[in-house]
């Protein structure tokens, strides 16, 4: 069956998603069991248990009730650690009210598990994976999220110790391991540039999903007014980012992908261009000039 969703492997992480400014943004990382925003709740992300809501604009949240309803249909109702929507605190009551209104419309109650995401307070998803919310700069209060792998590594000074020796050290209360954080994927949602780009878990994430909404030269003012990123902002942003992969999202429909690629080539250094791509490019990386398979917006 045809789908509007894009599926691609970026580095060692598989992404399924769709992002078009003002219409729908939803991005899932199936192997991490995480979905960033829900858009209109396409079927490809319904099974993902951890839903990260950045802000309340409908192109990012319209499918929230449908997400929980569909999970009920397939017998996967929300509970601890599954079917949970993490969201900014100010959205908790409105979203609960929304679910209540839909319950009256539908004639049945759909359970929804909401958890407030507090900036800089980690959310444990599993033993080796955490979610770290952080504030971004949008016209309304909004969050970004980093999915971070957590590893416990043996301290170098104990590398030559045998297994039994390490056990004895632990019995004596000696800390033989240190915590290593490996940021895997960061999703910034809708935002202008800001200090959050200098956070280690953001700029060092293997993948950063970064909006770049506007490309037309006459739309710089619109970008500033809406707290969005314009392509002209990228040359100042790129030196701050150490990410292996920078994936641009949230381009407007008024911008043809071939034109966006051309402008990207004009403003970015070759090394930065090499690590930058568009989520909605179904045909390859950002350096391609052709648009196979109708990939223009």
Image: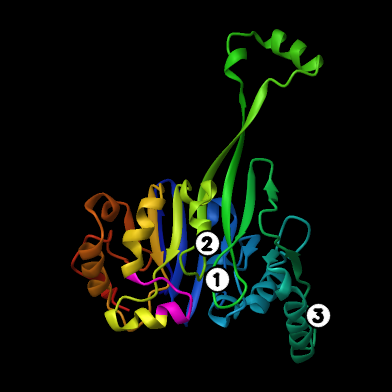
Horizontal relation, residue 256 to residue 104: left or right: left
Instruction: Check residue 28 in the rendering and tell me which mark sits there, or answer none.
Output: 2
Q: How far apart are the alpha carbons under marks 3 and 1?
A: 21 Å
Mark 3–mark 1 contact, CB under 8 Å? no
Q: Nearer the viewer, residue 167 or 282?
A: 167
Mark 2 or 3, nearer chain start: 2
**Pointer 1 residue:** 43
Q: Which of 273 and 36 is in front in this view?
A: 273
Residue placed furthest toward the bottom? 105
* Residue 203 pos. (x, y %): 47, 50
Location of residue 76 in the rendering, given as x and y in whole percent from the top left corner: 71, 64
Which SS class for mark 2? Answer: strand
Label 3 sits on a secondary structure element that is loop
Going 68% across and 78% down the picture, which residue do you hit? 65
Q: Distance between the residues labelled 2 and 3?
A: 26 Å
Percent position (x, y) of residue 243?
41, 48
* Quadrant in which the N terminus is drawn: bottom left
* Nearer the camera: disc 1 or disc 2: 2
Callouts 1 and 2 close, C-beta under 8 Å: no
Residue density around tag 3, few if under 14, some if 14–19, many if 20 or more, within 10 Å: some
Q: Earlier in the sequence, mark 3 or mark 1?
A: 1
The answer to whether one can see residue 1 in this image is no
First to last magenta residue range: 223-231
Task: Assign the C terminus to one quadrant of the image.
Answer: bottom left
Query: Between tags 2 and 3, which lies in front?
Result: 2
- Disc 3: which residue: 109
What's the distance in space between the residues labelled 1 and 2, CA to CA? Answer: 11 Å
Across and down, in percent, residue 174 comes to: 75, 18
């Amino acid at each position: 069956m045809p789908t509007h969703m894009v599926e691609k492997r970026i580095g060692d992480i598989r992404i399924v998603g769709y992002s078009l400014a003002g219409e729908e943004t939803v991005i899932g990382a199936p192997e991490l069991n995480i979905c960033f925003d829900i858009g209109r709740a396409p079927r490809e992300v319904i099974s993902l248990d951890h839903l990260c809501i950045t802000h309340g604009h409908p192109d990012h949240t319209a499918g929230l009730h449908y997400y929980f309803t569909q999970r009920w249909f397939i017998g996967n109702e929300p509970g601890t650690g599954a079917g949970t929507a993490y969201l900014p605190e100010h959205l908790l009551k409105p979203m609960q009210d929304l679910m209540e209104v839909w319950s009256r419309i539908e004639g049945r109650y759909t359970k929804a598990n909401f958890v407030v995401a507090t900036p800089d307070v980690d959310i444990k998803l599993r033993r080796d994976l955490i979610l770290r919310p952080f504030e971004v700069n949008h016209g309304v209060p909004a969050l970004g999220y980093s999915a971070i792998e957590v590893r416990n590594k043996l301290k170098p000074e104990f590398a030559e110790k045998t297994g039994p020796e390490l056990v004895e050290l632990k019995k004596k209360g000696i800390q033989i391991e240190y915590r290593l954080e490996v940021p895997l994927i960061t999703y910034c949602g809708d935002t202008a540039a800001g200090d959050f780009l200098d956070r280690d878990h953001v700029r060092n994430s293997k993948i950063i999903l970064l909006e770049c909404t506007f490309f037309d030269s006459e739309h710089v003012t619109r970008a500033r007014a809406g707290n969005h990123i314009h392509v002209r902002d990228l040359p100042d942003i790129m030196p701050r980012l150490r990410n292996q992969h920078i994936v641009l999202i949230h381009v407007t429909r008024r911008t043809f992908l071939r034109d966006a690629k051309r402008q990207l080539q004009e403003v970015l250094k070759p090394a930065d261009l090499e690590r930058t791509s568009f989520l909605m490019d179904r045909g390859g990386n950002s350096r391609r000039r052709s648009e196979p398979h109708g990939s223009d917006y």
